[in-house]
Image (cartoon, coloured by chain):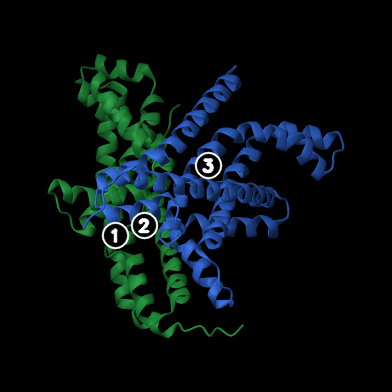
Chain colours: A green, B blue
């Protein structure tokens, strides 16, 4: 073994790495929130929306879930400018992430909604709640609680998948790593450090999610 | 002077699909072997084995696949090996698939009712024969739908090999797009190829799941 490891140049660029990690966190958090909104709307359409919209949502989900994220990014980043809509790499990355996670989260939330007992809805209506109020208070919250573990692991997977947006040179952690390695030729070292940073970030997100669970959903279960 | 997107360009992308399929199959085969080992280690009564497997799973599920690809690809250099992207992608995807399949199958093994383990123990079966004849055959049935579902993930994951320069469907698409600059047409074609590979598998997985759910509800 003749290779000498050089972590010096990697550690010297810690500012850039931290900035990249911060952008990855921002992109992921933004995509989680927007994706959740998309997913709730789509799940509502799938379970109680009009039939024509349901077909569109089904098509959206099937296409996104059966094609790779990398191809979706290329489609958005290279395709949209030909329609006259020019997005910066970061904006294209965020859009691709929202579109992607929205489809997966829709299926997860739909499963949660379908697990709500019919009688709950009827009880809500009998109490004089409007359909939208029933959806908001009687269906959505317990549904989100049921699927919370699946939903949050999908979100963490999204954060990890976001490294792929480096392919269109957004300013995320992986892109920064690519820049550093092409300047210093310390490819293995920089990717090792960045991999550890991703590991820490995924542990941090999972800690954050269990904190949110305790604050939001920890009411006694009477089932 | 831009090239037109014609039959030749389409065939170039389509021909690259065989590399996507081959890479998926290799990683899947490797993942089955590795995943079985990881799953058995994970449920093993020996603490050291189950902790090692747990660590392996945590690392591979907690870091991006792209980073795993880069580490294998560039890590081989530090050992003085010169891996081509094809071998690096196969190794990284196999390791990744082992971790994910290992975790899926651990759940399936543990989903076999406790009574089965106890009955086999009462019959005097040793751990290897208990696994081989009682637990694994029953776990197999539970494992089938999520395993087929994971194969879909794996096929999509092979697209990342494009980033380290392996010419499968996505890379072929990039090459053609650079020459023709018809992104919708090119990446639409690429997406359609993945869709044609993945959609039937997704549906088989969903069907199997429903069938087993119906069978176990009875």
In the rendered view of the protein, which quadrant contains the N terminus of chain B?
bottom left
| Snapshot quadrant of residue A159 | bottom left
Q: Residue at x 19, y 20 (%)?
A: A130
Instruction: Give me the C-alpha separation between circle 3 and circle 1.
Output: 26 Å
Badge 1 crowding class, 10 Å Cα cut-off, few under 14, some 14 to 19, many 20 or more, is: some
Provide residue A36's location: percent of width, then percent of height. 29, 41
Circle 3 residues within 10 Å: few <14, some 14–19, many ≥20: many
Residue sitting at 48 percent across and 62 percent down?
Answer: B69
- The image quarter containing residue B116 is top right
Instruction: From the top left corner, tell me how far across and down residue B185 is, in percent.
Output: 28, 43
Work out whether disc 2 and disc 1 sit on a shared chain: yes
- Residue B3 on image: x %, y %: 26, 52
Q: Residue furthest right?
A: B124
Residue A51 falls left or right of residue B39: left
Seen at 45% across and 67% down, the residue is: A196
User: Can you identify the residue that label 3 sits on?
Assistant: B151
Is B122 rendered above or below residue A94? Answer: above
Secondary element under disc 3, as helix, strand or loop, is helix
Q: Which mark is residue A168?
A: 1
Q: Are marks 3 and 1 in contact (CB under 8 Å)?
A: no
Q: SS of the residue at dot 1?
A: helix
Residue to which mark 2 is pinned: A164
Tell me how far mark 3 sits from mark 2, CA to CA.
20 Å
The answer to whether A114 appears left or right of A27 in the picture is right
Q: Residue B48, relative to residue B190: is it above or below? A: below
Instruction: Out of B141 and B51, give the one closest to the viewer.
Output: B141
Q: Please, which chain is the residue tagged with disc 3 on?
A: B
Q: Residue furthest left?
A: A84
User: Which of B154/B1 is in front?
Assistant: B1
């Amino acid at each position: 073994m003749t290779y000498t490891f050089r972590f010096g140049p990697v550690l010297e660029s810690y500012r850039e790495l931290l900035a990249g990690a911060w952008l990855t966190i921002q992109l992921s958090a933004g995509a989680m929130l927007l994706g959740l909104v998309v997913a709730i709307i789509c799940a509502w359409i799938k379970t109680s929306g009009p039939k024509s919209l349901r077909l569109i949502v089904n098509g959206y989900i099937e296409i996104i879930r059966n094609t790779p994220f990398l191809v979706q990014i290329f489609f958005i980043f290279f395709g949209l400018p030909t329609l006259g809509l020019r997005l910066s790499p970061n904006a294209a990355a965020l859009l691709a992430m929202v579109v992607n996670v929205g489809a997966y989260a829709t299926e997860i939330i739909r499963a949660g909604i379908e697990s709500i007992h019919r009688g709950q809805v009827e009880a809500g209506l009998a109490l004089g709640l409007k359909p939208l109020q029933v959806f908001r208070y009687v269906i959505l919250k317990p549904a989100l609680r049921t699927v919370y573990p699946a939903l949050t692991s999908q979100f963490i997977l999204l954060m990890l998948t976001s490294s792929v947006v480096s392919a269109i040179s957004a300013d995320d952690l992986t892109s920064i790593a690519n820049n550093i390695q092409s300047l210093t030729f310390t490819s293995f070292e920089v990717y090792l450090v960045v991999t550890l940073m991703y590991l820490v970030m995924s542990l941090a997100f999972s800690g954050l999610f269990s904190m949110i669970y305790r604050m939001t959903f920890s009411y006694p279960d009477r089932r | 002077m831009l090239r037109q997107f014609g039959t030749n360009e389409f065939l170039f992308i389509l021909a690259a699909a065989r590399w996507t399929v081959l890479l998926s199959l290799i990683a899947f085969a490797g993942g089955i072997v590795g995943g079985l080992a990881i799953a058995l280690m994970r449920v093993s009564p020996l603490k050291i084995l189950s902790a090692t497997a747990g660590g392996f799973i945590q690392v591979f599920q907690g870091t991006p696949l792209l980073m795993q690809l880069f580490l294998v690809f560039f890590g081989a250099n530090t050992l003085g090996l010169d891996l081509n992207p094809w071998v690096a992608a196969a190794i990284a995807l196999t390791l990744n698939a082992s971790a994910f399949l290992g975790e899926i199958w651990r759940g399936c093994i543990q989903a076999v009712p406790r009574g089965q383990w106890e009955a086999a123990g009462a019959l005097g079966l040793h751990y290897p024969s208990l696994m081989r004849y009682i637990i694994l055959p029953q776990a197999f049935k539970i494992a089938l739908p999520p395993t087929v579902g994971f194969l879909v993930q794996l096929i999509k994951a092979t697209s990342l090999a494009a980033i380290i320069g392996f010419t499968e469907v996505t890379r072929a698409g990039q090459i053609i797009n650079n020459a023709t600059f018809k992104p919708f047409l090119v990446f639409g074609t690429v997406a359609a190829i993945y869709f044609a590979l993945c959609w039937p598998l997704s549906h088989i997985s969903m069907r199997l799941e429903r069938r087993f759910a119906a069978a176990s509800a009875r």
